[in-house]
Image (spheres, coloured by chain):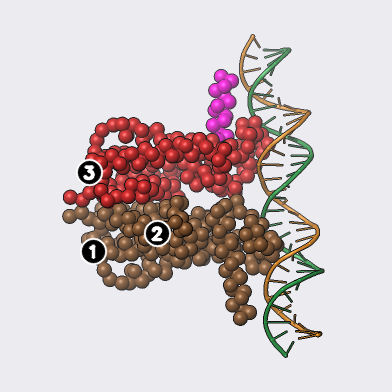
Chain colours: A red, B brown, C green, D orange
Amino acid sequence: MREAKYKRRYGEILDAAAAVFAEKGYHGASTKDIADRLGIRQGSLYYYFPSKEVALAEVCWIGVDGFVKGLQSILGGDGSTAKKIRAAVQNHMAPMATRHHYVKVFLKERHNLTARTGAEVTHRADEYERLLDRLLAEGIAAGALRANLDRRLAALAVLGLCNSAIDWFDPARGGIDRIADEYADILIEGLTVTP
Amino acid sequence: MREAKYKRRYGEILDAAAAVFAEKGYHGASTKDIADRLGIRQGSLYYYFPSKEVALAEVCWIGVDGFVKGLQSILGGDGSTAKKIRAAVQNHMAPMATRHHYVKVFLKERHNLTARTGAEVTHRADEYERLLDRLLAEGIAAGALRANLDRRLAALAVLGLCNSAIDWFDPARGGIDRIADEYADILIEGLTVTP
DNA sequence: CAAGAAATCTATTATTCTATAGAATAAGCA
DNA sequence: TGCTTATTCTATAGAATAATAGATTTCTTG
């Protein structure tokens, strides 16, 4: 009970940090901004975090973690390359609705982490890119994707197109599924061979 | 001659501001950082700019201006919709190589401008989006683009995919043309009708 | 209820930052 | 050379910042 309460409160603090970082950027946000959102004093935050930067690292970690989990099982499952790409796009965009602030901060503020504080986040992000690369490699090997495709460029295109929605998508106004579907259409048509 | 010298120096100051804003972000960059890069004192900058924010506005303006100019003549010219889209993509990505810092700052830091300082930049960006929307509208009307296309989503996809390169493209290592070509392939295949 | 632990607050420190005012230097020109 | 203007520097005001230490309140649990 003691522990559970702490965890709940810790989550609230993290939510506030994510929201403020997302709105103002890491350097534009002050620890007082975060405290104000919670109705507590600036210094009280340091009961939960040793530094502002560690708070950023935690937010980024949650932001990236949502991506990786689903993609692993998509790769393990069966179905055509096109279906897997569609599933991967939906998997990538879903957290933009459910964990909007966390994803935004990961995408736009993670570069403010130092090598020390950002190591785990970077590692997880690399893992995700490797999974995506494997999806594309298998698609090319299966003859489903254009053979002349630059795999690295293609992976960056998938990520770039999906991520771009974070700049304008508002989870308060409508779902992300239709957007994911439309983007999957574009990517599948754009990447697969045309018979 | 007196005027020309001022303009040249002003450009150097702006280059330094663009570089520092691009590297550290608007709030992460201090006026001292900019001055250090120029080998002058922090206070001396205020001979050229009334405020840090106005400097940002100038950088952003140059960043967005490069986009608009070319697209107008592309729309005016003739050729298929596919060719125009390819030209538009190349037009969009070219400044990412030639004015890398300016474009990066426009894309990633313009939200730090207030309504007052950012009005012209916003206006120019809106103008650009309208031109792109017209290109797509004409493509749909001509039957070249998929009729079921959500025009707004399609425009955001074009912009999002192109802009994403700013996160990883390094003008010091290779040109942008091949990337633009590959992205144009994806977008054209993804947006046009498949017979 | 009472003791101990958890959570928050008050108060402060040492920096850092933007912007300004006025002095000093450099450059252009009669 | 000496006058004038352009540019940069020195010095500082005033506000904001992250983080710490210790006091105080609130909660949990026996």
- Chain letter of mark 1 equals B
Amino acid type of the residue that numbered disc 2 sits on in the rendered structure: Ile
> Residue B138: image x %, image y %?
28, 64
Measuring from the top left, give residue A178's x and y in whole percent: 33, 45
The chain holding disc 3 is A
Q: Quadrant of residue A176?
A: top left
Marks 3 and 1 sit apart, C-alpha to C-alpha, by 33 Å
- Chain letter of mark 2 equals B
The x, y position of residue B46, in whole percent, is 67, 65
Q: Secondary structure at mark 2?
A: loop
B138 to A20, vertically: above or below: below
Residue at 23% x, 44% y: name it.
Answer: A144
> Could you tell whether A186 is left or right of B166 in the image?
left
Q: Are marks 3 and 2 in contact (CB under 8 Å)?
A: no
* Residue wearing tag 1: B142
Secondary element at image label 3: loop
Residue B182: quadrant of the picture: bottom left
Q: Which residues are magenta?
A: A1-16
The tag on residue A143 is 3
**What separation in Å lies between label 2 and label 1 (alpha carbons)?**
30 Å
Q: Position of residue A76 (x, y in %)?
A: 31, 31
**Badges 3 and 2, same chain:** no
Front one among A154 and B144 = A154
Q: Could you tell me which residue is drawn at 32 percent across and 34 percent down?
A: A74
Q: Say which residue label 2 marks.
A: B176
Q: Secondary structure beneath disc 1? A: loop
Image quarter of the N terminus of chain B: bottom right
Circle 3 residues within 10 Å: few <14, some 14–19, many ≥20: few
Instruction: Give amino acid for label 1.
Output: Ala
Quick check: D28 left or right of B100? right
Q: Point out which mark residue A132 bears.
A: none
Q: Which residue corresponds to the image point at 36% horizontal and 71% vertical from the top-left?
A: B73
